[in-house]
Amino acid sequence: MSYSNYREYLAHPKFRAVRRVVMTAARWRCRCGARATEVHHRRYPPWGTFDTPDNLIAVCHPCHCRIHGKDD
């Protein structure tokens, strides 16, 4: 396994590369039109594996909070 916790996962070069693909494909725009700053997992990948671009959505922070039912 190449990461031991979620923070390490998010900083891992493999995740960062997939995140970059998703953000570039979305032109760094959220569906609401704001600048996307985060990615949302449709489903979390099994522990020890990495995401694929089709599992991530480019979102802005407020939309990401809304998806998770949290305040901004």
Image (cartoon, rainbow, N blue to C red):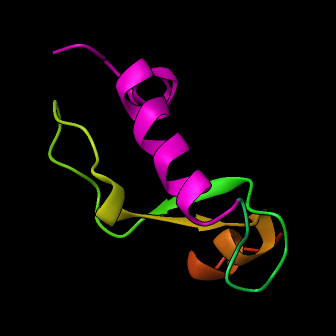
Residue 57 in percent (x, y) is at 50, 67
At x 49% / y 31%, what residue is drawn? Answer: 16
Q: Is residue 29 above or below residue 45?
A: below
Foreground: 63 or 70? 63
Q: Write the start and end of the magenta stretch as one range.
A: 1-27
Quadrant housing residue 70:
bottom right
Foreground: 51 or 9? 51
Residue 20 in percent (x, y) is at 54, 42
Residue 38 in percent (x, y) is at 65, 54
Q: Is residue 6 above or below residue 28?
A: above
At x 76% / y 86%, what residue is drawn? Answer: 32
* Dominant SS type (magenta): helix
Instruction: Determine whether, in the image, residue 64 is placed left or right of residue 61.
Output: left
Instruction: Determine whether, in the image, residue 8 is placed left or right of residue 64.
Output: left
Quadrant housing residue 56:
bottom left
At x 27% / y 51%, what residue is drawn? Answer: 52
Foreground: 37 or 7? 37
